[in-house]
Image: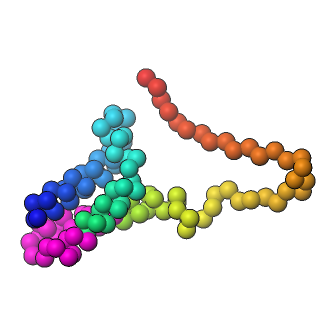
Amino acid sequence: MEIILVGSSIILVLSVSMSLVKNDFWVFKILEYPRLQKFFVICFVIGCWYYLWPIQNIYYLILLGSLIVCFLYLAYKIWPYTVFAKKEMLRVPSTDPENEVKIFSANVLQENK
């Protein structure tokens, strides 16, 4: 169980750390998108560290600390997309509902090579 916990912790820390690299190569870009999934998996692994394995070794403590830092970073990146964050687009009351047009515009930067 110890090997699985250490191995999964190292893989999770590396996957969060590699997404910080500002490079357009697919190995770095592919790790940016599953933030919510990594958030919940890191939460589960931190819980496993606390309940299944006593932290007696300094290396395990450093690994747990880096998992907590990754957890906080992902929480910071996910926060704007939750219902708790402040809305960016506020509703404007319509003066004439019969003659209104609603436009939603989104800009997605995508480079095709």
Does any portion of residue 88 appear in the rendered image?
yes
Residue that extends furthest to the top in the rendered view of this protein: 113
In-image side of 79 versus 57 (left or right): right
Quarter-of-image position of residue 2: bottom left
Does any portion of residue 65 appear in the rendered image?
no
Residue at the image point whose x is 60% and y is 39% from the top = 107
Q: Residue 17: image x %, image y %?
A: 29, 52
Q: Residue 21: image x %, image y %?
A: 32, 44
- Please provide the residue range marked out in magenta: 47-71
Quarter-of-image position of residue 49: bottom left
Q: Quadrant of the C terminus?
A: top left
In-image side of 36 versus 1 (left or right): right
Q: Quadrant of the N terminus?
A: bottom left
In this rendering, the answer to whether 95 lies above or below 61 is above
Colouring used for the render = rainbow
Question: Magenta-highlighted stretch: main secondary structure?
Answer: helix
In-image side of 106 versus 28 (left or right): right
In-image side of 39 versus 13 (left or right): right
Q: Residue 40: image x %, image y %?
A: 35, 62
Residue at the image point whose x is 14% and y is 68% from the top = 60
In this rendering, the answer to whether 80 lies above or below 33 is below
Q: Does the magenta segment cover residue 65?
A: yes
Q: How many marks?
A: 0
Residue at the image point whose x is 34% and y is 49% from the top = 20
Between residue 71 and residue 1, name the one nearer to us: 1
Q: Does the magenta segment cover residue 105?
A: no
In this rendering, the answer to whether 107 lies above or below 111 is below
Residue at the image point whose x is 13% and y is 76% from the top = 54
Quarter-of-image position of residue 71: bottom left
Q: Residue 69: image x %, image y %?
A: 30, 65
